[in-house]
Image (tube, grey):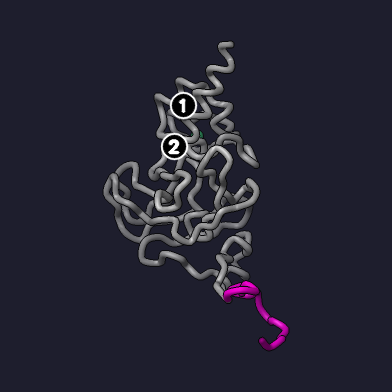
Amino acid sequence: MTISTPTTAPTTTTTPTGGKAKYSAHLSNGDPTILSTSYIPTHPHLFLVHFSPGDYNSSLVTQRPFARGETLAYMDSAERAPLKRYSTVQVGEESHIELNSDLLYINHSCDPSVRFEVGEERKMWRAVAERDIQKGEALSFFYPSTEWSMAQPFKCNCNSSRCLGTISGAKDIDAQTLLEGYFVNEHIRRLKEAQSKEEIK
Ligand SMILES: [Zn+2]
């Protein structure tokens, strides 16, 4: 290993053990000057990140159409995360993963184009089209479908007639509204049903 002083933002980070490239697009925080040297698309024939300055203004835009029910991508570069963060996805009652791919840039909508199907087993982790999606669309998924309690709640601006307003996780959404109106993963359904029983007691 040679030691050198980088003159630009590093494009990849090597791990001490394997030399495997880590996902680094989000390190640019939407700064286009860093982006131009550091962004390496993970699924360039399927979708690309469109960066905008500011927090949460970037998006993931399709490079081809998808049919309803089609798998956009498996989360095969995801890794289990020790702690919940703004960037993690919850896959079980106590389990979270880092996506380590451009799927990180799929924003929330209360009327989403994509669902994240997850579970304790990693072979289950994938993004599926909720409806037909056109080329050039910005993708969205319903964050409370995976997240029980979010690390960073926010006010939703999806402009859907089904918009739930402030999104802080499934724990704060009325059980009937959530379970009858939206796709949620099994761990969220279990947690919501357990919470409902707790409230009746
Ligand atoms: Zn909304």
Amino acid at circle 1: Leu
The percent position of residue 195, horizontal first and vertical second, equals 56, 22
Q: Is residue 189 left or right of residue 168?
A: left
Q: Considering the image in quadrants, where does the C terminus appear?
A: top right
Q: Considering the image in quadrants, where does the N terminus appear?
A: bottom right
| Farthest residue, direction left | 67
Query: Residue 178 has which mark?
Result: 1
Rendered image quadrant of residue 19: bottom right
Query: Residue 185 has which mark?
Result: 2
The percent position of residue 197, horizontal first and vertical second, equals 53, 17
- Comparing 132 with 81, the one in front is 81
Amino acid at circle 2: Asn
What residue is shown at x 63% (from left), y 75% (from top)? 10
Q: Is residue 151 left or right of residue 195?
A: right
What residue is shown at x 45% (from left), y 44% (from top)? 119
What residue is shown at x 40% (from left), y 49% (from top)? 124
- Comparing 70 with 92, the one in front is 92
Residue 154's place in the image compared with 104, above or below, is: above
Highlighted range, magenta: 1-18
